[in-house]
Image (cartoon, rainbow, N blue to C red):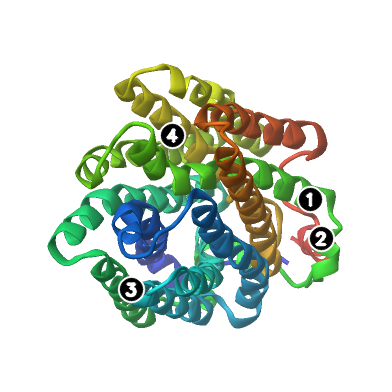
Amino acid sequence: MAIMLSDATRTTRPKLIEMQWYFVAMVTAAIAISYFDRQTLPVAIAAIQRTIPLSNQQFSWLQFAFLIPYALLYAAGGRMLDVLGTRRGFILIMLWWSVACALHGLAMNFGFLLGARCLLGMGEGGALPAATRVVAEWIPLRERSTAMGIINAGTAVGSVLAPPLIGMVLLASGWRMVFFASGAAGLAWVVWWSVRYRGSNDASIATLDARLIAQQLSFLDLVGMRGVQVLVFAKFMSDSAWYFYLFWLPKYLYDVRGFDVKHVSYYAWIPYAASGIGSFLGGWLSSTLLSRGRSLNFSRKFVLGLSALFMPVVMLVPHVPVGWALMLFSIAFFCQQSWSGLIMTLPADIFPLSAVGTVSGLVGFGGAIGGAIFGVVAGFLLGQGFGYGTLFVIVGTFHLIGFLAILLLGGKVQPLKTPDLLRIESQS
């Protein structure tokens, strides 16, 4: 059963290509807002502590309160997106986390802050599964890693903008206004998305994947697949390191390097800028290898391995001046986001559209659980006097462990051949 495009469809091809990348830009903006929202607390923590005293252990529990519901809703949100569809699901997700972010500004004690952080994690858990569904719906296979690299660069855009913008608002209006303004930005995005996004019926013209899926894979089918389990484990390891950096880097600069709010706003954005470049270049390199005839398996694993190879540089951070430390953080952030963009491309590479949201959710669930657990471990070790040097040694190994699991246990990266797909291909 060959799938033919009509003349009318052919004439709309330039418009469809424009729509593909317009929607990628919209999702990138959403991810940027997401990461801006989650950076509000770490960047504003010094100002918040003057109103609400917080110990290192309490700070680690705020990370835990964000990441556990984030993990649970990452998995459940992925399935929800597969049921509701991308457009409606993304609206619900963004409304929830924008209101939750604004609620932080009403906090008067640790308990309220903990509850608001929990609600924020619940909302943001569906963001990357939704992004992956947009890519699966709209972007052809050969361009997916580039698209996910661009979207993943949104994490850097939000994180880069957070220190200077939050610093400006802090100095002008206080820490509560930081959360109110950030929540308002998310609500504005919801209006934009509601007006402009078109669903998968249009996307099926842009990429044949949306037409080739007839079989629904059950949740238990997916959980039982070794490939899914390996991706979850790899994300568990790598995001244990990544969330440590996200939550603890500003505090490290405050506590160990003697930074104040102004210094953090001047310099803390640099590693996040490097992460954005790494996200884009990692996806671009993988797509380039694929377009030059290398296999999908090689194109993805080569860049993943290269990214993991340089992550141990953070072990040197405690032993160098602050300028060199920022450079080492920048290298690690560059490689982390190169890695992350490709990890989140793999569900769209391997699984049918009907399962992409669920698999992406499970993978993100693994990452968030890793971040939550290691965040508490980090707070405990610091409380016991071990220092940041010990933590940098530990997190410097995590990506290599994750890559070895992919290399040795993950099998080949290639589209999953369900019975329906095999039948369609045999009739083509």
Q: Tags 1 and 4 in contact by the CB under 8 Å rule?
A: no
Mark seen at residue 334? 4
x 73%, y 37%: residue: 406
Task: Pick the residue in front: 331 or 326.
Answer: 326
Q: CA distance from mark 4 to mark 2?
A: 31 Å
Label 3 element class: helix
Which is nearer the N-term, disc 4 or disc 3? Answer: 3
Element on which disc 1 rests: helix
Q: What amino acid is found at the position of numbered circle 3 in the picture? A: Gly
The residue that mark 2 highlights is: 223
Give the mark nearest the N terminus, 3 or 2. Answer: 3
Label 3 belongs to which residue? 105
The residue under label 1 is 229
The spot of residue 133 in percent (x, y) is 56, 65
Separation (CA) of disc 3 from disc 2: 39 Å
What kind of element bears circle 4?
helix
Gap in Å between the C-alphas at discs 3 and 1?
Answer: 39 Å
| Dot placed on the residue nearer the N-terminal end, 1 or 2 | 2
Residue 181 figure quarter: bottom left
How would you rate the neighbour count of disc 1 (Cα within 10 Å): few for under 14, some for 14-19, many for 20 or more? many
Q: Could you classify mark 3 by the number of other residues whose Cα lies within 10 Å: few (under 14), some (14-19), or many (20 or more)?
A: many
In the rendered structure, are the residues bearing label 3 and label 2 in contact, judged by CB atoms less than 8 Å apart?
no
Distance between the alpha carbons at the discs numbered 1 and 4: 26 Å
Question: Residue drawn at (28%, 37%), measured in percent from left and top?
Answer: 259
Please report contact status of discs 4 and 2: CB closer than 8 Å, yes or no: no
